[in-house]
Image: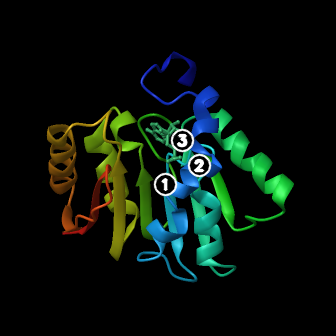
Amino acid sequence: MTSNITHICPVERSGRLDSKFRRLLQNPQKILAPYIRDGMDVLEVGCGPGFFTFDIAHMVGKSGRVVAVDLQEGMLAKVREKIRRSGAGQNIVLHRCDEDRIGVSGNFDFVFLFYMVHEVVDKEAFFRELESLLKKDGQVYMAEPPLHVSKKAFEETIRIASDAGFVVVDRPKRFPDKIVVLKKA
Ligand SMILES: C[S@@+](CC[C@H](N)C(=O)[O-])C[C@H]1O[C@@H](n2cnc3c(N)ncnc32)[C@H](O)[C@@H]1O
């Protein structure tokens, strides 16, 4: 039951994740432009209230798809409501996952993990599952926040991802976040 989980970002704080001010600091289009193309199949795990989700949906276009996954139904409800109100995002598929399993099927071009991996309890199982969901030449973008995640913890997460079958492609610089791009080994 998610109600007993204390290490995840609560739905009550989702407003901070989805503000106009944040768009000035972390512009989704600018962050995603090097990675996302028309027609792609994108998996976004830990989508929260959908701050990135609609930009991804716009960038992949009608022939592409975003599978937006979160542990908390309250976060998915926020995305669902935005889809309803805006009439956009018809290529967004919402999925509520379990804490220990993403539980989607597919062969994705791109996996987007923004400020969420530090909340995942079993990172070994998480990256093994992602490896099975990614296309041979697909990429995973992982960004972690500066305060919650130390350099040591970030490097340990990359080691876990390597053990699960990933190699580092790039380490984009965007202060103050910790970012890595991975692909299959
Ligand atoms: C800090 S929020 C970031 C949300 C979004 N990525 C953003 O940047 O606005 C982290 C999100 O990850 C979700 N989450 C945590 N652990 C998860 C897991 N194991 N699987 C899927 N989602 C998870 C939480 O419910 C929360 O919505």
| Label number found at residue 25 | 1
| Label number found at residue 105 | none
Along the polypeptide, which appears first: circle 3 or circle 2?
2
**Image quarter of residue 168:** bottom left
At numbered mark 3, what does the secondary structure look like: helix, strand or loop? loop
Marks 3 and 2, how far apart at CA? 29 Å
Q: In this view, does 44 lie above or below 75?
A: below
- Crowding around mark 2 (Cα neighbors within 10 Å: few <14, some 14 to 19, many 20+) is few
Q: List x then y, in percent, for residue 49.
A: 63, 44
Q: Please indicate, yes or no, whether residue 108 appears anywhere in the rendered image.
A: no
Q: In this view, does 183 lie above or below 73?
A: below
Q: Are marks 3 and 2 in contact (CB under 8 Å)?
A: no
At numbered mark 2, what does the secondary structure look like: helix, strand or loop? helix
Outermost residue on the top side: it is: 4
Q: List x then y, in percent, for residue 19.
A: 63, 46
Amino acid type shown at disc 3: Cys
At numbered mark 1, what does the secondary structure look like: helix, strand or loop? helix
Q: Residue sitting at 58 percent across and 37 percent down?
A: 16
Which residue lies under the disc numbered 2?
Answer: 21
Amino acid type shown at disc 2: Phe
Amino acid type shown at disc 1: Leu
* Tally of numbered tags: 3
Q: List x then y, in percent, for residue 144.
A: 34, 46
Q: Please indicate, yes or no, whether residue 31 appears anywhere in the rendered image.
A: yes
Left or right: 15 with respect to 172? right
Q: Nearer the viewer, mark 3 or mark 2?
A: 2
Marks 1 and 3, how far apart at CA? 29 Å
Which residue lies under the disc numbered 3?
Answer: 97
Asked whether mark 1 and ligand 1 are closer than 8 Å, the reply comes as no
Q: Could you tell me which quadrant the N terminus lies in?
A: top right
Asked whether mark 3 and ligand 1 are closer than 8 Å, the reply comes as yes
